[in-house]
Structure formats: structure tokens, C-alpha cells
Image (spheres, rainbow, N blue to C red):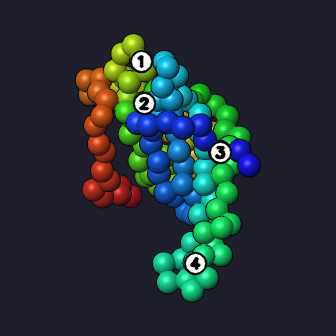
């Protein structure tokens, strides 16, 4: 079965039974910009059939459209509402400060427009959701 290539400095976001993996560095100047998902819906914290559930985990490549982020590593990905936001990272030649979103319902990537001064380019940072806005 297909699965993501070996990588590090990628992002992984657990959202509604799927583990989304984006980007990372594969070594030998291989900067990745692919999107994968692991179906984890069979996992239940107190499931007595845990061994059977673990054997049913499966990877797939979501057929996303739109304007995806460029290949990168050491970025962040954070779920807010129905979207996963990807920010910053390292492209191999520079640090980045762009913001993209993936709508998890439509699987459409979008480069987000922001207002105010943008954060300086960065990689290896963290993002945490403190409170959801109405």
C-alpha cells in the first residue's frame, strides 16, 4: 500500500479521525510538499478490539486542489475550525512566513491574505490554539 516517503521536520495534524501529514525534508536536497492522510477512525481509547483497529489503519493521498504551500520543512500546521493552517518553515534556500490553509471539507488549498505587519520568516517554531474565535 502507498505511504509517505521517509522524512523529518514535517507537520502532522490529527483532525476528525484523520492524521494529516504535510511536507518535510527527505534528505539529499529533497524538500517535500506532499499531503498524506492516515485514517485513524478505528482507534478508540478504551476499545477492547485495539489490536484489530490498529491493523486497519491506512494511508491515502487526499486529492487536494487550489494553491498549496511550496515544498518546506520545519513549518507548523494547526487545525482551526474546518481548516488546517500551514505557516512558515524552511524551503531549503530561505525561511518562510507565508500562510496557507487547507479546507478539510472541500480539500482546497488557499494562500491566505493577512493584514498588519507579517511575522518575520521563521522555521522550527510552534503554534498553539489558545481560544477559538466565534
Write the residue at 69% across / 48% down. 60
Q: Earlier in the sequence, mark 1 or mark 4?
A: 4
Q: Kindly identify which numbered label has been placed on residue 3.
A: 3
Residue at image point 41% right, 47% down = 78
Q: Residues within 10 Å of mark 4 (few under 14, many from 20)?
A: few
Q: CA distance from mark 3 to mark 1?
A: 23 Å
Query: What separation in Å lies between label 1 and label 4 (alpha carbons)?
Result: 40 Å
Residue at disc 1, secondary structure: loop
Q: Residue furthest right?
A: 1
Image marks 2 and 1: residues in contact by CB distance under 8 Å: yes
Tell me what residue is drawn at x 71 percent, y 40 percent: 63
Q: Which residue has dot 4 on it?
A: 50
Q: How many marks?
A: 4
Foreground residue, 52 or 15? 52
Label 1 Cα neighbours within 10 Å, binned few <14 / some 14-19 / many ≥20 = few
Q: CA distance from mark 3 to mark 2?
A: 18 Å
**Circle nearer the N terminus (2, 1):** 2
Marks 3 and 1, the one that precedes in the sequence: 3
Q: Is residue 98 rendered to the left or right of residue 39?
A: left
In primary-sequence order, the first of circles 3 and 2 is: 3
Farthest-out residue, top: 93
Whether residue 52 is situated above or below residue 121 in the rendered picture = below
Determine the image quadrant of residue 57. bottom right
Q: Position of residue 90 (x, y in %)?
A: 38, 24
Residue 36 picture location, percent across and down? 61, 44
Amino acid at each position: 500500500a502507498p505511504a509517505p516517503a521517509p522524512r523529518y521536520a514535517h507537520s502532522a495534524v490529527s483532525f476528525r479521525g484523520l492524521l494529516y501529514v504535510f511536507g518535510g525534508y527527505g534528505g539529499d536536497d529533497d524538500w517535500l510538499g506532499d499531503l498524506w492522510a492516515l485514517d485513524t477512525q478505528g482507534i478508540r481509547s478504551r476499545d477492547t478490539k485495539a489490536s484489530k483497529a490498529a491493523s486497519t489503519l491506512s494511508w491515502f493521498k487526499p486529492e487536494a486542489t487550489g494553491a498549496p504551500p511550496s515544498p518546506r520543512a520545519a513549518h507548523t500546521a494547526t487545525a482551526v475550525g474546518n481548516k488546517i493552517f500551514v505557516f512558515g518553515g524552511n524551503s531549503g534556500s530561505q525561511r518562510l512566513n507565508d500562510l496557507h490553509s487547507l479546507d478539510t471539507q472541500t480539500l482546497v488549498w488557499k494562500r491566505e491574505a493577512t493584514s498588519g505587519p507579517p511575522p518575520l520568516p521563521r522555521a522550527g517554531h510552534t503554534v498553539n490554539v489558545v481560544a477559538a474565535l466565534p
